[in-house]
Image (cartoon, rainbow, N blue to C red):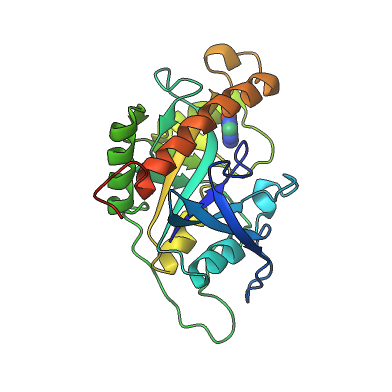
């Protein structure tokens, strides 16, 4: 079963034929909300709204550990994270879909590992490639089949939020090598890796980052909402193709 974690602009999957919802408890507390189970083109899919169904949980207060744990325990074999990002590069425009290949983590103070506590043995994970290669390939194949343009590489900077960045901070992220900036990519990706769960991300460019292009003098929240609404249609199509809708060889 594929699981989708939806961020801002994707608090439900309209194409999911819902069978039931489950409120799950984990050793790490409660996930952001009930997990919705159902089918897309007859294939099982689970969905969780990262910020809660009423969009009440800010990025730094999301219980990432509980979310990933719950999806893992309920049988997910891969997680697709969907999240809006700001674009640091001129050629990533609002509305574009980007499949990042790397992460730089600037977050702090978040519960970012399962390997802590009194009885824990010190454990390190390899995180050289933070996203699952095979899952990313499936996204590329799905995008090609659906005729949806996606950028195949980008360095994702995870910032703390909930405020947006200053223009100088964006300049610094660019010097560091980042292409897009968002607030929820970490520790989510690392926690999935700790559990051995394949994880990949679809970054939806909702705006130019602070100080860039039409965000030179500030970021317009109104235009972000409009962009997200349109792009999430492409995201839903991408997920449909990914699970095999319209593919006669997949029964
Ligand atoms: N910065 C950080 N996170 C974001 C942005 C941004 O500009 N846009 C959407 N999520």
Give percent across and percent down for residue 92. 42, 23
Pick the front one: 66 or 185: 66
Q: Quadrant of the N terminus?
A: bottom left
Give percent across and percent down for residue 7. 59, 43
State the count of labels: 0
- Residue, x 64% and y 43% (percent of image)? 11
Q: Is residue 63 above or below residue 152?
A: below
Pick the front one: 63 or 79: 79
Extreme residue in the left direction: 249
- Residue, x 65% and y 32% (percent of image)? 164
Judge left or right: residue 16 versus residue 144: right
- Residue, x 59% and y 23% (percent of image)? 210
Observer able to see residue 30: yes
Judge left or right: residue 44 versus residue 117: left
Extreme residue in the bottom direction: 119
Q: Quadrant of the C terminus?
A: bottom left
Q: Is residue 165 above or below residue 227?
A: below
Give percent across and percent down for residue 103. 42, 45
Pick the front one: 53 or 85: 53
In the image, ligand 1 is in what quadrant? top right
């Amino acid at each position: 079963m594929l699981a989708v974690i939806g961020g801002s602009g994707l608090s439900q999957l309209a194409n999911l034929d819902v069978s039931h919802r489950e409120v799950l408890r984990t050793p790490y507390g409660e996930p952001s909300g009930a997990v919705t189970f159902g089918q897309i083109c007859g294939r099982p899919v689970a969905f969780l709204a990262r910020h809660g169904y009423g969009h009440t949980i800010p990025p730094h207060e999301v219980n990432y550990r509980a979310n990933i744990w719950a999806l893992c325990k309920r049988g997910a074999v891969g997680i697709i994270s969907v999240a809006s990002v700001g674009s640091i590069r001129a050629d990533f425009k609002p509305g574009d879909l980007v499949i990042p290949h790397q992460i730089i983590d600037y977050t702090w103070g978040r519960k970012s590992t399962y390997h802590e506590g009194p009885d824990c043995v010190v454990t390190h994970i390899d995180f050289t490639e933070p996203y699952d290669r095979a899952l990313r390939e499936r996204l590329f194949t799905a995008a090609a089949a659906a005729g949806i343009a996606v950028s195949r590489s980008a360095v994702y900077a995870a910032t703390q939020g909930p405020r947006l960045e200053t223009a100088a901070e964006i300049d610094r992220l660019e010097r560091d090598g980042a292409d897009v900036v968002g607030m929820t990519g970490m520790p989510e990706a690392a926690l999935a890796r700790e559990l051995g769960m394949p994880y990949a991300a679809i970054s939806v460019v909702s705006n130019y980052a602070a100080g860039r292009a039409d965000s030179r003098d500030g970021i317009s929240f109104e235009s972000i909402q409009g962009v997200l609404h349109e792009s999430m249609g492409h995201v839903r199509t991408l997920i449909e193709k990914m699970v095999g809708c319209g593919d006669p060889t997949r029964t």
